[in-house]
């Protein structure tokens, strides 16, 4: 992997990282971050979201290059 990164840099190519995050009702209801000593309040009706996947591309020089929302988890061959 390191040699591939060195090759990319030597060729002057742009390196873009891709990642997928999937959000579901269960993710939203059971995992959250909040201020210390504060209570998280969720109404069930507000958290009934459809499953969706976010694919984001970032680079060192630009930051967010782009993103795509997908209606479900993306499977790869």
Image (cartoon, rainbow, N blue to C red):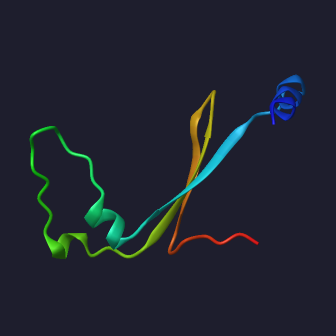
Q: Please state, as top left, top right, bottom left or bottom right, where the N terminus lies in the image.
A: top right
Q: Nearer the viewer, residue 57 or 20?
A: 20
Q: Image height check: is 16 above or below 50?
A: above
The residue at 26%/66% (across/down) is: 29
Rendering coords of residue 40 (x, y %): 14, 54
Q: Image height check: is 63 above or below 67?
A: above
Q: Quadrant of residue 31?
A: bottom left
Looking at this rendering, what residue extends furthest in the top direction? 10
Rendering coords of residue 28 (x, y %): 31, 63
Rendering coords of residue 18 (x, y %): 64, 49
The residue at 17%/39% (across/down) is: 35
The residue at 46%/69% (across/down) is: 52
Q: Quadrant of residue 58?
A: top right
The residue at 65%/72% (across/down) is: 75
Badge count: 0
Rendering coords of residue 21 (x, y %): 50, 58
Q: Please state, as top left, top right, bottom left or bottom right, where the C terminus lies in the image.
A: bottom right
Would you say 3 lies left or right of 17 here? right
Q: Image height check: is 3 above or below 31?
A: above
Would you say 1 lies left or right of 28 here? right
Would you say 2 lies left or right of 74 here? right
């Amino acid at each position: 992997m390191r040699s591939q990164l060195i090759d990319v840099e030597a060729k002057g190519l742009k390196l873009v990282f891709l990642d997928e995050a999937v959000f579901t009702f269960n993710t939203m209801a059971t995992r959250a971050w909040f201020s210390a000593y504060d209570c998280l309040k969720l109404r069930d009706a507000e958290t009934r979201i459809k499953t969706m996947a976010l694919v984001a591309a970032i680079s060192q020089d630009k930051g967010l290059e782009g993103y795509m929302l997908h209606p479900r988890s993306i499977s790869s061959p």
